Amino acid sequence: MSDTITTRTYSADAKSRDVRPRESERDETQQDETQVCPECSGHLVTDEEHGETICEDCGLVVEDTVVDRGPEWRAFDSAERDSKSRVGAPTTKMMHDKGLSTNIGWQNKDAYGKSLSPRQREQMQRLRTWNERFRTRDSKERNLKQALGEIDRMASALGLPENVRETASVIYRRALNDDLLPGRSIEGVATSALYASARMAGTPRSLDELEKVSRVDKMELTRTYRYIVRELKLEIKPADPEQYVPRFASELGLSDEAERQARQLLRDAKETGIHSGKSPVGLAAAAVYAAALLTNEKVTQSEVSTVADISEVTIRNRYKELLEVQDGTLLA
Amino acid sequence: MSGPADSIEIQNVVASTGIGQELDLEALADDLPGADFNPDNFPGLVYRTQDPKAAALIFRSGKIVCTGAKSIDDVHDALGIIFDKLRELKIPVDDEPEITVQNIVSSADLGHNLNLNALAIGLGLEDVEYEPEQFPGLVYRMDEPKVVILLFGSGKIVITGGKRTDDAETAVEEIVERIDALGLLG
């Protein structure tokens, strides 16, 4: 009995202690916003229910019919939520105007869903043309539009998620604002921005993969990439070979056991430092191959080679080194 | 003490000079035995000296770039030979054309394997360029002396961009100190 009582009083105490600091915080924020009555310098409070700001001391109504920025009350289904929503889609860096402008729909239909008359149809076509011209007024905006389209296209082809596209778009915008574009191609900078952002997000794609979906060659890509990274001070860490393992393993249809083994091989290799100066893609490919052999799963070097875009010779060389490390750690 | 600084070897010295006289390279290519002139590939005439081993690129404007020499003295010797050859062909050459060293490339060995990944983060990612997918070495741009150092996993390094012979030495001492401070040497 006594136990329950003590716990109860304790929890009540905790509650009141929780509440108090919050109240004092609220008071402070109100005072910070210079909420002082113009008549008697009294303390002002906001009455959200009536949409008024009134003085606590003399009762003067300082402001009435305040705009309610909250969401529309009571939406029961998704259609209602849509019709009551006062906001559009969130802004995104992936569109050259951050998605804030209006688009004229491509369907030639009016608000009731009826088809437009040929005359109106012609008019809408004309409006669309002008809207498009108006949306991209100067060369920088046209440049951005093309580049962001390109980033989106390549990211889709490489299966990169939204956040990577967003980062790539931000990197590209920074490059454009810092005037790094003159003398470099839009495609080149867009590809490097995507490569950099994929690395930053921990889902790296190899240069060969990017080269396949990009319209620029590897030479230009690497040159632009190094330039962008240096000028924008992006501080990108060297890619970790482990980050390539899951993708290669799943493309080869290997078991979790093999994948785990591959990661372990790479971790051992990193401890002994034999990965210094070696291509992370090559190391990952060799680790996946070695792990498959160690777990008795059948893959050939040429299969790994196609999946990882690494030559069989590289796989053989790296694989030997990885196994030497493995033997070393087992003996030690 | 025998340290990495003792292993420094100069690999290449590049210097430029000019004779203050425009040249007809077509005619010069015919008159100078052993000269390569291929205007389709390269606008300059290439003349190689055997002792000291060096190559001089002679341009139409009369400017000459000497490359491939192993020391500053060798550069002066090689250019001296070329000036004499030109004088033999009755081409007026200033008595003592000014020779400016543009670049010295040296190599050295730190004697330990390096963990480049750790080093890239330790030295500060903004001064470092390490892209193992593109190039196995780590590129470190040093401000003082203003040189570029390439560090490799084997511990061998290349110092380039210096204009004086002791630049390489100071750079090696500096980099060894920095790597040692990070506890990454050996």
Image (cartoon, grey):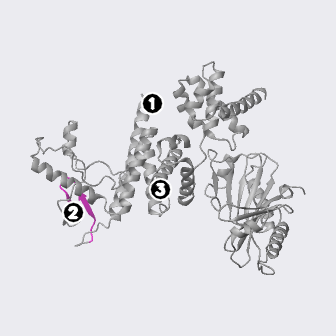
Residue nearer the viewer, B22 or A1: B22
Taking the spot 47% from the left edge, 54% from the top edge, the residue there is A171
Residue drawn 69% across the image and 44% down it: A277
Q: Is residue B21 above or below residue A226?
A: below
Compute the Cα span from label 3 to label 2.
60 Å
Q: Which mark is residue A3?
A: 1
The answer for which chain carries disc 2 is A
> Where on the picture, by quarter, is residue A287?
top right
CA gap between label 3 and label 1 equals 75 Å
Residue A17 visible in the picture: no
Question: Are the residues at dot 3 and dot 2 in contact (C-beta closer than 8 Å)?
Answer: no
Q: Is residue A5 left or right of residue A259?
A: left
Q: How many marks?
A: 3
Q: Nearer the viewer, mark 1 or mark 2?
A: 2
**Mark number displayed over residue A185:** 3
Q: In this figure, which residue is indicated by the disc labeled 2?
A: A54
| Local secondary structure at mark 2 | strand
Upstream in sequence: badge 3 or badge 1: 1
Q: Which mark is residue B150?
A: none
- Local secondary structure at mark 3: loop
Residue at image location 64% in from the left, 58% down from the top: B41
Q: Which residues are magenta?
A: A41-55
Return the x and y of residue A91 as percentages of the image width and height: 33, 52
Quarter of the rendering occupied by the C terminus of chain A? top right
Mark before the other along the chain sequence, 3 or 2: 2
Q: Quadrant of the N terminus of chain A?
A: top left
> Which amino acid type is shown beneath numbered disc 3?
Ser
Q: Amino acid at mark 2?
A: Ile
